[in-house]
Image: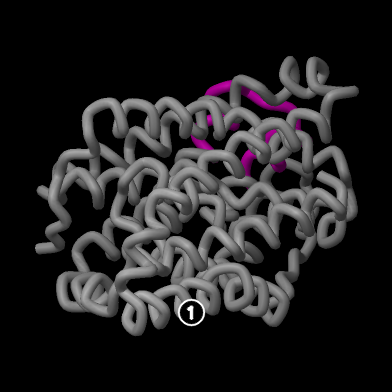
């Protein structure tokens, strides 16, 4: 994705995150803190299960070193702000989603160097160090997610009538942005789309489907309600492809490592769209309960 598209996406997400904040209250986040089971399950799925699954896919498919490293890089970069948008559209637990994004993003400052150091040694035969710009990640998290959500929550607390009135327009705007993002991602790799799909399509879609499925099933096994299961599923299965692509080209200095994240960045919207359609068709039933 080029820088212009990235900037447009970031601005769009900031606006949407503000809109999402209009639907949240402090009590939503208090439930996450007071009943941390969903948070623990979500982080376990993102930080531990996801990289292990990525490694198993690379071994099972006997991928080339370049593709294998791309899969591991993607698996090391759990969900960013886009996962919050998709959770909102799928009627998941938005407070849980935002909390998972924030905590997982901070944890990846430690986990990405570890996972990618292992991957480079395992598949490339070199112990290349991978550094993560912690300040930039925290800044992006604050600007794109936490600050706009907080402002939206403040508006909700002060002007509840306005917040309720904006609920439907925000949902429509979110859906429009979702469609535009899919179009933008497709256009950005249009020239090499078929080549990318043939090389990285299978591992990318397997990682996406398995992580979403495992996250959802794991949540249900621990008796979480559907909104939490949806949030954990999306947070587990929607990776931060932008971060993965950035690390591939800058930290690892090899654009070929970005092929899997680029393909994944397109395919993940397809599976997310299915979840969103199913949830909305079924009425998004399932009360929020974190116990």
- Occupied quadrant, residue 95: bottom left
- Please name the residue that numbered disc 1 is placed on: 151
Of 160 and 256, nearer the camera is 160
Left or right: 191, with 77 as reference point? right
Q: Where is residue 88 in the image (x, y as percent from the top left)?
A: 40, 50
Left or right: 93, with 31 as reference point? right
Q: Please tell me which residue is depicted at 38% across the width and 56% down the height of the picture.
A: 167
Of 210 and 3, nearer the camera is 3
Left or right: 169, with 192 as reference point? left
Q: Where is residue 82 in the image (x, y as percent from the top left)?
A: 55, 51
Q: Please give the range of residues in magenta.
A: 55-72
Q: Please tell me which residue is depicted at 34% across the width and 33% down the height of the picture.
A: 213
Of 47 and 235, nearer the camera is 235
- Occupied quadrant, residue 152: bottom left
Q: Coloured how?
A: one colour
Q: Where is residue 79 in the image (x, y as percent from the top left)?
A: 52, 54
Q: Position of residue 58 (x, y in %)?
A: 59, 31
Q: Does the magenta run of residues contain 52?
A: no
Left or right: 178, with 258 as reference point? left
Q: Please tell me which residue is depicted at 78% across the width and 42% down the height of the picture.
A: 258
On-image quarter of the C terminus: bottom left
Q: Label the magenta part by its dominant secondary structure.
A: helix
């Amino acid at each position: 994705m080029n820088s212009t598209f990235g900037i447009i996406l970031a601005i769009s997400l900031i606006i949407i995150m503000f809109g999402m904040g209009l639907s949240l209250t402090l009590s939503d986040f208090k439930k996450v803190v007071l009943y941390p089971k969903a948070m623990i399950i979500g982080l376990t799925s993102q930080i531990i299960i996801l990289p292990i699954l990525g490694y198993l896919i690379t071994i099972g498919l006997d991928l080339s070193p370049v593709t294998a490293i791309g899969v591991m890089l993607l698996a090391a970069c759990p969900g960013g702000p886009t996962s919050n948008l998709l959770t909102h559209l799928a009627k998941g637990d938005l407070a849980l989603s935002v909390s998972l994004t924030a905590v997982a993003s901070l944890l990846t400052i430690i986990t990405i160097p570890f996972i990618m150091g292992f991957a480079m040694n395992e598949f490339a035969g070199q112990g290349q160090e991978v550094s993560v710009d912690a300040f930039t990640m925290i800044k992006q998290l604050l600007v794109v997610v936490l600050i706009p959500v907080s402002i939206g929550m403040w508006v909700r607390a002060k002007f509840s009538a306005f917040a309720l009135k904006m609920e439907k327009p925000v949902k429509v705007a979110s859906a429009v942005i979702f469609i535009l993002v899919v179009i933008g991602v497709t256009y950005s790799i249009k020239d090499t789309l078929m080549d990318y799909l043939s090389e990285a399509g299978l591992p990318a879609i397997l990682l996406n489907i398995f992580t979403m499925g495992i996250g959802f099933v794991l949540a249900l096994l621990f008796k979480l309600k559907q909104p939490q299961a949806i949030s954990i599923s999306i947070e587990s299965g929607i990776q931060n492809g932008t971060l993965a692509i950035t690390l591939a080209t800058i930290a690892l200095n090899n654009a070929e490592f970005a092929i899997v994240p680029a393909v994944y960045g397109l395919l993940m919207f397809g599976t997310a769209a299915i979840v969103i359609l199913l949830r909305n068709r079924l009425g998004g039933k399932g009360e929020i309960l974190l116990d």
